Amino acid sequence: GENVEQHPSTLSVQEGDSAVIKCTYSDSASNYFPWYKQELGKRPQLIIDIRSNVGEKKDQRIAVTLNKTAKHFSLHITETQPEDSAVYFCAASLSDYKLSFGAGTTVTVRA
Amino acid sequence: DTEVTQTPKHLVMGMTNKKSLKCEQHMGHRAMYWYKQKAKKPPELMFVYSYEKLSINESVPSRFSPECPNSSLLNLHLHALQPEDSALYLCASSQERRKSMKYPNEKLFFGSGTQLSVL
């Protein structure tokens, strides 16, 4: 099955700085890569996703890039704010209902 | 309505109890899921229903019994659970895939979860 590795496991940034989280996947057939944000005690929420026919996608302060050759994808958050503090999970899918999640990154934005 | 609602929000049960978790969505999604999430870990898939039929069972112990009464509802019946089953149980839904599509829509929407404690 698909194996997704996520780094770093924790990330502390100053408010206003950028945050970058990187994930690698093992199965080159994976074609869907969502990112979920989970605040403490809340549900995972889809914040952005990208498909394998696209190299980059942006939504306001959030962007995701995909390198199919290297089998890695990254989440970029610019101008971080305290409300960006959460656990972020990347995932990859082979279109079989199963999302393979990374282990998560705990992001702390320091005021 | 873009919500997946789950009840109860919290549940404490003994190892001999029988209880049920409930999930409801009104987004017209025909795929519904149960996930289990331990603290500081990613969600783990348990079951998938597609058009009210069980499509995937990730080798879940029989003390967990899913049920999909109709396209909007999903239940998880619990019986004789163990303390290690304590976790956050998340329901999710998505549009059903059309296999003819090269990139089927797989956006997964999670419910707020049931925090389960087994004593």
Image (cartoon, coloured by chain):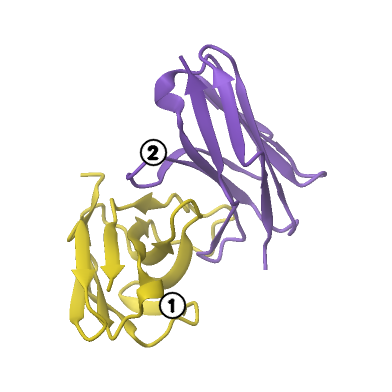
Chain colours: A purple, B yellow
Q: Locate residue B117 relative to residue A72 in the image: left or right.
A: left
Parent chain of label 2: A
| Real-space CA distance between mark 2 and mark 1, rounded to the nearest whole angstrom | 30 Å
Q: Which residue is mark 1?
A: B55
The residue carrying pointer 2 sits among few (fewer than 14), some (14 to 19) or many (20 or more) residues within 10 Å by Cα, namely: some
Q: Residue furthest top?
A: A16
Task: Judge whether B72 appears above or below A51 on screen.
Answer: below
Where residue B1 appears, x then y in whole percent? Answer: 20, 44
Q: Is residue B23 visible?
A: no
**The one of B79 and B107 positioned closer to us in this rendering:** B79
Q: Give amino acid for label 1.
A: Ser
Q: Which residue is mark 2?
A: A39
Where residue A92 appears, x then y in whole percent? Answer: 61, 53
Q: Which picture quadrant has residue A70?
A: top right
Q: Locate residue A90 relative to residue B66 in the image: left or right.
A: right
Disc 1, SS: strand
Q: Residue furthest front?
A: B119
Q: Give amino acid for label 2.
A: Glu
